[in-house]
Amino acid sequence: MRRKIREVAVRLRARGRADAGMVTSEYAMGIIAAVGFALLLYEVVTSGQVREELQSIVKKALSARM
């Protein structure tokens, strides 16, 4: 009985070790995707036309009467 429990424990530990790097790689891919999206968003927001539109909105908001 003890031998069987030991065999099961060894298999479970081996299975846990096999997946140990998977979580790290998933985090890495998530970070890479987030950085890529942030760069794309930055490029869009800092483009000439978008910058002009944002400045226009801010100027209208600041010059509005209350």
Image (cartoon, rainbow, N blue to C red):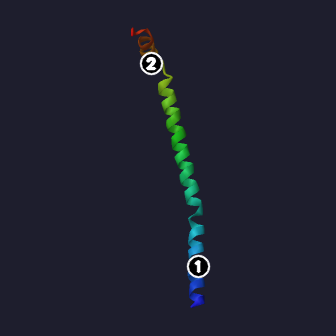
> Residue 55's x, y, as percent?
46, 15
- Give the residue at mark 1: 9
Q: Residue at x 52, y 41 (%)?
A: 34
The local crowd at label 2, few if under 14, some if 14 to 19, many if 20 or more residues have their Cα within 10 Å, is few
Q: Farthest bottom residue?
A: 1
User: Which quadrant does the C terminus fall into?
Assistant: top left
Amino acid identity at mark 1: Ala
Does 1 sit above or below residue 38? below
Does 21 sit above or below residue 58? below
Q: Which mark is residue 36?
A: none
- Asked which quadrant contains residue 21, the reply is bottom right
First reached walking from the N terminus: tag 1 or tag 2: 1
Does 66 sit above or below residue 18? above
Does 50 sit above or below residue 8? above
Q: In this orientation, which residue lies closer to the viewer: 62 or 33? A: 62
Q: How many marks?
A: 2
User: Which quadrant does the N terminus fall into?
Assistant: bottom right
> Residue 48's x, y, as percent?
48, 18
- Give the residue at mark 2: 54
- Secondary structure state at the residue bearing disc 1: helix
